[in-house]
Image (spheres, helix red, strand yellow):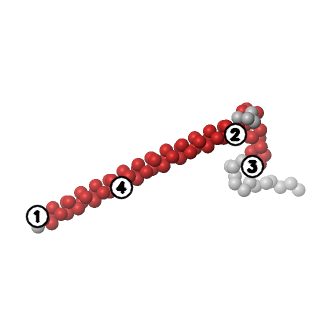
């Protein structure tokens, strides 16, 4: 009569699990501090994202500079080889 329920996304918490986690958060931090905690978590995630983007930009600039250097070194070596012939 009662079949087992297969979760849509295994590994992700469902409704009852989320309620238990929220209840524990309220008991630990109190209802007044949860918005502050969420705000600071959001700000930390934003800072992390900005830092990651800056690092990605620096890496792409370094890659571009290396490609330009390799192109100029190959073009100068081709120019000198044609001049000697």
Q: Which residue is mark 4?
A: 64
Give the residue displayed 38% in from the left and 52% down from the top.
61
Label 3 sits on a secondary structure element that is loop
Cα separation, mark 2 vs mark 4, equals 43 Å
Q: Residues within 10 Å of mark 4 (few under 14, many from 20)?
A: few
Q: Could you say which quadrant of the image residue 80 lies in?
A: bottom left
Question: In which quadrant will I find the N terminus?
Answer: bottom right
What residue is disc 2 on? 35
Side of 39 relative to 22 (left or right)? left
First in sequence, mark 2 or 4: give its number: 2
Report how far apart the C-alphas of labels 4 and 1 lie in the structure: 31 Å
50 displayed left or right of 16: left
Decide: is 83 above or below 35.
below
Determine which residue is flagged by label 3.
14
* Marks 3 and 4, the one that precedes in the sequence: 3
- Judged by depth in the image, the label closer to the viewer, 2 or 4, is 2
Q: Which residue is mark 1?
A: 84
Kindly identify the residue that appears in the image at 74 percent across and 33 percent down.
30
Q: Earlier in the sequence, mark 4 or mark 1?
A: 4
Give the image location of residue 68, x and y in percent: 30, 57
Q: Position of residue 60 (x, y in %)?
A: 40, 53
């Amino acid at each position: 009569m009662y079949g087992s329920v297969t979760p849509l996304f295994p590994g992700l918490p469902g409704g009852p699990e989320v309620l238990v986690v929220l209840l524990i958060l309220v008991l630990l931090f109190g209802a007044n501090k949860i918005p502050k905690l969420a705000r600071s978590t959001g700000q930390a995630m934003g800072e992390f994202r900005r830092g990651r983007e800056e690092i990605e930009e620096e890496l792409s600039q370094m890659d571009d500079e290396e490609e330009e250097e390799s192109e100029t070194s190959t073009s100068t070596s081709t120019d000198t080889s044609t001049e000697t012939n």
